[in-house]
Amino acid sequence: MTLTIGVDIGGTKVLGGIVDTSGNVLVQTRRDTPADNPPETLARILDVIDDLLAAHRVEAIGIGAAGWIDAARSTVLFAPNLAWRNEPLRDEIQARVDVPVFVDNDANAAAWAEFEFGAARDALNSMVLFTIGTGIGGGIILGKQIVRGAHGMAAEMGHVQMVPDGHPCGCGRTGCAEQYASGSALVRFARAAADQQPDTAHRLLALTDGDLSRLTGPLVTRAAQDNDGAALAAFDQVGFWLGIALADTVQILDPEVIVVGGGVIDAGDLLLKPTRHSYAEALNNRGKLPVAEIRAAKMGNLAGVVGAADLARRR
């Protein structure tokens, strides 16, 4: 059986695993990411790889990195949550191991995992992934191929402008989808609703001991599950904007399936119900024409590991 290593590098963790041809993770290990220290981040990545190489013989190593990867899939040009600027990641790792190393964007790797093994495994040739976390990431697959763009940086759906002169975004623009349909937006909407109508936010206020600066996405989810009005209103707002973003994606790409993943998908129908409603309303004029089905991701936090490993195997 051919085995490969997949490593998923984010702003808080380096997660690695040995993956078989069916997408099963046989062994996994992780380290914390010292996000502000590139040499130490590289050392943690190599620690993870060394642990896995000691466990099994593998044919290749795939790296999914959170950042903009160049067209050669070698250098991390920029990473918003890591101190990487023009980091020659592939060459640095390749110099220390004896098997081929391949680098891709982490959302591309996650999209590939969902396409091959997860929520879109029955799709014939196309799908789009939206990862909803602190920000919004994405991956596009058309004709059974990942769409990377001329410079390797396609599928930044989180930075498509939705509201002209809207909320400032970390990318330097204003009104990006990430500012209205992400986990960060969920917290902002919930905090605003609780400030404006505290009588609807009893559970939110209880969970934060009345200090809304302590509010987090998981706490908003817990409050919404307990029928807190402000939390439910926040999910309705995020779902509204996310549904519009998905509808715009359909108009441009017409994929078979849209998969919604990332940490916020743990909320399930709290997010998906208003998203599907907004999506259907936005596409209402298409009548009975076919549109992509919205599905929840299935691969969880191992999607990046599995996708990176499988992409390395195919290279």
Image (spheres, rainbow, N blue to C red):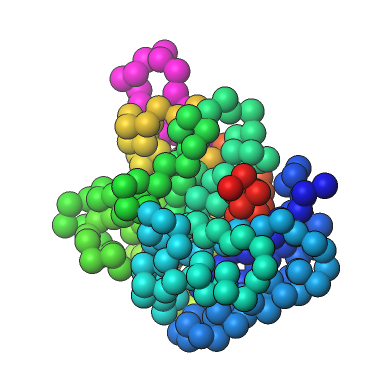
Q: Let me know if residue 38 is in the magenta part.
A: no
Outermost left residue? 165
Question: Which residue: 71% across, 56% down?
Answer: 59
Task: Establish if 192 lies above or below 71.
Answer: below
- Would you place residue 143 above or below residue 140 in this image? above
Displayed quadrant of residue 179: bottom left
State the image coordinates of residue 81 (x, y, percent, origin top left): 43, 73
Residue 104 shown left or right of residue 250 in the figure: right
Q: Closer to the camera, 195 or 248?
A: 248
Q: Is residue 268 visible to us here? A: no
Assess whether residue 278 is covered by the magenta stretch.
yes
Q: Nearer the viewer, residue 89 or 173?
A: 89
Front residue of this view, candidates 274 and 26: 26
Left or right? Give the position of 28 relative to 170: right
What is the count of numbered marks? Answer: 0
User: Is residue 242 depicted above or below 136 in this figure?
Assistant: above
**At x 82% / y 63%, what residue is drawn?**
56
Rendered view: 266 above or below 141? below
**Residue 254 left/right relative to 160:** right
Residue at image coords 45%, 49%:
138
* Stretch of the chain drawn in magenta: 277-294
- Report the residue at 52% width, 75% height from top: 92
Percent position of residue 308, x then y:
60, 54
Is 313 or 78 nearer to us in this picture? 313
Regarding residue 8, the answer to whether it shows in the image is: yes
